[in-house]
């Protein structure tokens, strides 16, 4: 079993190391999964395993293909929406208007607020990144800020104080309901305090680091892949906001009945609205759709590669032992629950995965002990959004590599600070506040 644990955590370490080195995830993820497989004694192929038993090929490809089957159309419509907003000049128009109102130094705040509104409106985290990136690029260009901080701003607005807060329609806030019998507003008082803390502390940290980089002479550096054309005329910023409102409203209306499939309708409607409102401003709508499609394919392939790694990890005996150990941690059940969910989310690269694996084991045990279900709901929700953002996480790779075109070396330090460290502090704060009776 010791060898199994070395394989488990060694495989994750290898995945993180090679990802930080900039290697292609489509090679790195299966290679790391193979390391886990060999040290845990899993068969390589289904032909070498008993019928229905776990093996490297089946478990990796089930995770890989399952994610594509679930998310491809949402990635596609999200990427196309982002591109038509960019090509029509709508993103640039909104950006210039925001900069004129709140000042160039607050460009990051504008991105954070845009991401927060969309995330709390029910739009998928991946789709938010696709949708807001063109506006973020325009804002950072206008403000002449280093572009390597864009992924951190996108992620901070999406995955911290909004994703896991009370009332959020994101899946990370809804999974505990099934196991704990709570509702989406569980522990809202503590949730509000933690969310405000994460927002203020994270924004202060981000602006401090950006200012330090600017003082060191860093500026916005354009690339050949950027939209270079200098527009003489831009669409009206208020009309340009309509497609974003369309996405938000439609996803909200259909969220209960269609769940995440509502995003396909919402984002398609947003793209159509962008075209109808700003069609005379497009430079090449066909190319925008093609570029969006290619971007979606690259993004979902990278993310699926990491999900496949998680599929192999979950099949090992070492993983089951690790989950058992963490769910039996002595002391406050809130600490044990938070730690178990966070670590499993880190191993699988998924915040929702961390909850879905840990809660069926934790919930009955802790509820029998008389643990406050609302407190447990909010604590595990917040903690699930921490270690899921290690360098190898699917959302991390998609945002940094596929959407923003940055390297982990440049973009991840601040990204990790805001999406791992800040939520961990938030989870600790939540445990403390619940423990003193709030």
Image (tube, rainbow, N blue to C red):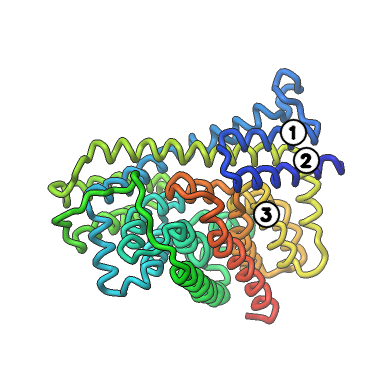
Where is mark 3, residue-wise? Answer: 359
For the point 31% across and 74% down, the residue is 103
For the point 38% across and 36% down, the residue is 294
User: Secondary structure beneath disc 2?
Assistant: helix
The front one of 297 and 367 is 297
Tags 1 and 2 in contact by the CB under 8 Å rule? yes
The front one of 31 and 318 is 31
Q: Where's residue 314, x and y in %?
A: 70, 41
For the point 81% across and 47% down, the residue is 321
Q: Where's residue 10, x and y in %?
A: 75, 44
In the rendered image, the vertical position of residue 252 relative to residue 98, given as above or below: above
Where is mark 1, residue-wise? Answer: 37
The front one of 59 and 38 is 38
Q: Which of the 4 quarters of the picture holds residue 432?
A: bottom right
Tags 3 and 2 in contact by the CB under 8 Å rule? no
The answer to whether residue 111 is seen in the rendering is yes
């Amino acid at each position: 079993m010791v060898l199994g644990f070395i394989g488990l955590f060694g495989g994750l370490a290898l995945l993180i190391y090679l990802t930080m080195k900039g290697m292609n995830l489509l090679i790195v993820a299966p290679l790391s999964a193979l390391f886990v497989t060999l040290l845990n004694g899993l068969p390589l192929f289904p032909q070498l395993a008993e019928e229905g038993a776990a093996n490297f090929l089946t478990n990796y490809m089930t995770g890989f293909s399952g994610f594509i089957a679930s998310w491809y159309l949402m990635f596609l419509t999200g990427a196309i929406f982002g591109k038509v907003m960019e090509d029509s000049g709508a993103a640039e128009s909104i950006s210039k208007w925001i900069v004129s109102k709140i000042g160039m130094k607050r460009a990051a705040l504008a991105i954070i607020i845009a991401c927060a509104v969309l995330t709390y409106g029910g739009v998928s985290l991946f789709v938010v990144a696709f949708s807001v990136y063109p506006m973020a690029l325009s804002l950072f260009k206008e403000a002449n800020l280093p572009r390597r901080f864009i992924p951190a701003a996108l992620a901070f607005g999406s995955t911290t104080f909004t994703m896991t807060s009370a009332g959020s329609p994101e899946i990370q806030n809804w999974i505990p309901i099934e196991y704990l019998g709570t509702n989406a507003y569980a522990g809202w008082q503590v949730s509000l305090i933690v969310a405000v803390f994460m927002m203020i502390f994270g924004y202060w940290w981000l602006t401090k680091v950006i200012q330090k980089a600017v003082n060191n002479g860093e500026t916005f550096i354009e690339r050949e892949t950027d939209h270079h054309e200098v527009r003489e005329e831009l669409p009206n910023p208020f009309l340009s906001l309509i497609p974003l409102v369309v996405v938000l409203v439609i996803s909200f209306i259909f969220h209960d009945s269609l769940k995440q499939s509502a995003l396909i309708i919402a984002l398609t409607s947003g793209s159509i609205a962008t075209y109808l409102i700003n069609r005379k401003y497009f430079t090449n709508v066909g190319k925008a759709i093609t570029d969006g499609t290619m971007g979606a394919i690259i993004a979902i392939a990278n993310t699926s590669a990491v999900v496949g790694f998680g599929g192999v990890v979950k099949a090992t005996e070492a993983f089951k032992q690790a989950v058992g150990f963490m769910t039996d941690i002595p002391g406050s059940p809130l600490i044990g629950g938070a730690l178990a969910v966070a670590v499993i989310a880190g191993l699988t690269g998924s915040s929702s995965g961390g909850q879905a694996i840990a809660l069926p084991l934790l919930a009955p045990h802790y509820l029998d002990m008389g643990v406050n279900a609302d407190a447990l709901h909010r604590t595990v929700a917040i903690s699930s959004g921490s270690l899921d953002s290690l360098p190898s996480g699917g959302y991390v790779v998609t945002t940094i590599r596929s959407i923003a075109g940055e390297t982990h070396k440049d973009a991840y330090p601040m990204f990790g600070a805001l999406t791992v460290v800040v939520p961990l502090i938030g989870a600790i704060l939540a445990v403390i506040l619940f423990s003193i009776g709030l």
